[in-house]
Amino acid sequence: MLLAGTVDPVNASQQRARSYGSTSYWQEYPDFITQLQTLINASPNTALFDAHGWSGDNTAANRKIAGSYLADRLCGANGETAYYSGYKKHRVLFHLIGHSHGGNVANELMARAAELAEWPACWEFASVCYLSTPFYRDLHLLSKVKLAKNCQFLNVINEYDLTQRFLAAFSLHDLIGMIQKFEQRHAAQHGINTTPVY
């Protein structure tokens, strides 16, 4: 599943944050798409989901709306028609590839899936690839509820991306910190003692 990043840092229209089916974002990366499609064609039980386009507006609210809407759309929640209605009783593993803020949309998708009664118990997230995703300390936090047991994470960064390095208050490196923070909150909510014993 491909999740596009921010494309318009000026427009903050929440009305456009829902999916509108645009896949033009990924046309800038033809070699990547060709190689991905070749891999998928070689795997008989695999499908490429590139039908989720969102506004790309650079606001936390729009990223949350985009991820939530995608979860609703996939499983048929909140009045949406389930995109994969024929697979609701089959085990489905999702592999997410999010570029830039598309990685945060992925986190919002996983968070929404965790809270939806309509999300099938047999649907899980098997891998997440973050391509230069900016991680925040208190926004777009990772939810582990619907992760497959051996879910894999890949965090790819670009040290020369000046927009991300100098124009925003976040870290490209803090995926591990984000996971640790989640684990601490989970332990606190469930009364689990995480103090090391020596």
Image (cartoon, grey):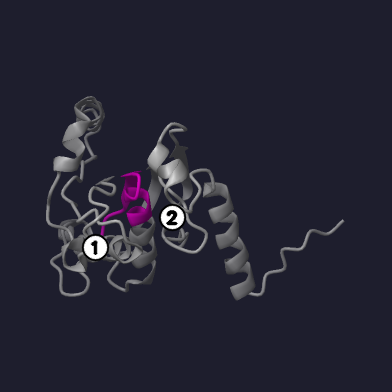
Image quadrant assignment for residue 106: bottom left
Residues 125 and 12: in front is 12
Give the percent coordinates (x, y) of residue 114.
Answer: 39, 66
Whether the magenta-drawn stretch holds residue 95 is answered as yes
Residues 173 and 142: in front is 173
Query: For this view, does 5 lie left or right of residue 142?
Result: left
- Mark 1 packing: few (<14 Cα in 10 Å), some, or many (20+)? some
Q: Quadrant of the C terminus?
A: bottom right
Residues 27 and 85: in front is 27
Give the percent coordinates (x, y) of residue 71.
Answer: 27, 62
- Secondary structure found at label 1: loop
* Residue where numbered disc 2 is placed: 147
**Label ID, residue 12:** 1
What residue appears at the point 39 percent right and 57 percent down from the top-left corner? Answer: 107
What residue appears at the point 14 percent right and 41 percent down from the top-left corner? Answer: 24
Give the percent coordinates (x, y) of residue 129.
Answer: 39, 41
What residue appears at the point 23 percent right and 33 percent down from the top-left corner? Answer: 40
Q: Nearer the viewer, mark 1 or mark 2?
A: 1
Does residue 131 appear in the picture of this structure? no
What residue appears at the point 34 percent right and 66 percent down from the top-left corner? Answer: 112
Instruction: Examine the rendered structure and indicate whether residue 41 appears above or below residue 196.
Output: above
Q: Quadrant of the N terminus?
A: top left
Q: Which residues are magenta?
A: 89-106
How far apart are the two marked residues, 1 and 2, measured between alpha carbons? Answer: 31 Å
- The kind of residue tagged 1 is Ala
Give the percent coordinates (x, y) of residue 170.
Answer: 48, 52
Does residue 73 appear in the picture of this structure? yes
Image quadrant assignment for residue 88: bottom left
- The kind of residue tagged 2 is Leu
Residues 100 and 90: in front is 100
Q: Earlier in the sequence, mark 1 or mark 2?
A: 1
Query: For this view, does 189 lie left or right of residue 27?
Result: right
